[in-house]
Image: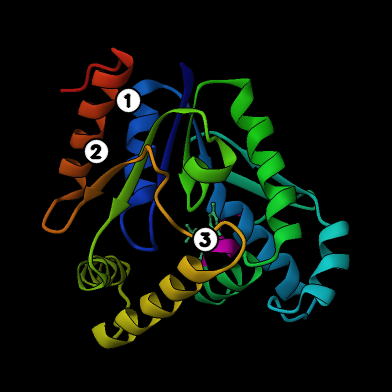
Amino acid sequence: MEKVITIDGPAGVGKSTTAKGVAEALQWQYIDTGAMYRAMALAATQAGIDPSNGEEVLPVLERTDIELYPTLPVRIKLNGSEVTKEIRSAEVSEASSKISVHGFVRRKLVELQQELGRKQPSVLEGRDTGTVVFPNAGLKIFLDASVEERAARRLRDYRKAGKEIALEKIVEELRIRDQRDRTRKESPLVPADDAVILMTDGMSLCEQIDKVMMIVRERFGIGDHS
Ligand code: DC
């Protein structure tokens, strides 16, 4: 069985925390595919182009080199410079959702993700890692939660970081990103036919990780986690 676990789902569902927790418990590589789309979006932003415009994005992509280190904490370089922090801004979040609609962007990044994931047992996190990147993954998880639940979790994260944002604004942003991610022509956000779908409303992140680890143990017969 391919030693690959894919964790897909919409924005704000706790994929990162869950995928990192599972990778850490198993001592497997952690591949944050969203970080790659974010780095590409940052390249577009730095070049001053519109990430939705394929004709403008193509030449930027051709001169863009992205290196993701599949470690914890995650590190990512864009054309040789570390951009680990820069890719987390709200502007880059929005641009990454826009740039990820282009098939030629996806093909380049999927290739990089497959190359990394083939080297060592890996946990991948994203939108299409179970459907497109590793369709033969040993385990595919699709995390989901209502938009209200995800917005409430985001609000708690913002507050912890000392930021105050209206809940309605977060709900609205999540709805827009969801709509774009789920309805794009190229690799839309959908669960793979053989994915385990976990509805996480009302679950804490710890419970989420525990639940996924239970499924991992059953599937692979590994990874004791108390
Ligand atoms: O998971 P994230 O928020 O870091 O992802 C940023 C954007 O990148 C998200 O809006 C959609 C896109 N993305 C994608 O299209 N496919 C992936 N496998 C991962 C992310």
Alpha carbon distance from label 1 to label 3: 30 Å
Mark 1 = which residue? 25
Residue 206 falls in which quadrant of the image?
top left
Left or right: residue 94 versus residue 26 is right
Q: Amino acid at mark 1?
A: Ala
Question: Which of pointers 3 and 2 lies earlier in the amino acid sequence?
Answer: 3
**Does residue 138 sit above or below 142 in this rendering?**
above
Q: Quadrant of the C terminus?
A: top left
Residue 194 falls in which quadrant of the image?
top left
Question: Label 2 crowding class (10 Å Cα cut-off): few <14, some 14-19, many 20+?
Answer: many
**Does residue 54 sit above or below 115 in this rendering?**
below
Question: Label 1 crowding class (10 Å Cα cut-off): few <14, some 14-19, many 20+?
Answer: some
Mark 2 = which residue? 209
Residue 92 falls in which quadrant of the image?
bottom right
Q: Amino acid at mark 2?
A: Ile
Q: Of 66 and 133, which appears nearest the observer?
A: 133
Query: Which residues, given as a range, are shown in magenta?
Result: 84-88
Alpha carbon distance from label 3 to label 2: 25 Å
The residue shown at (48%, 53%) is 127
Can residue 63 be spotted in the picture? no
The residue shown at (38%, 54%) is 9
The residue shown at (35%, 84%) is 172
Left or right: residue 1 versus residue 104 is left
Can residue 96 be spotted in the picture? yes
Are circles 1 and 2 on residues that touch, CB within 8 Å? yes
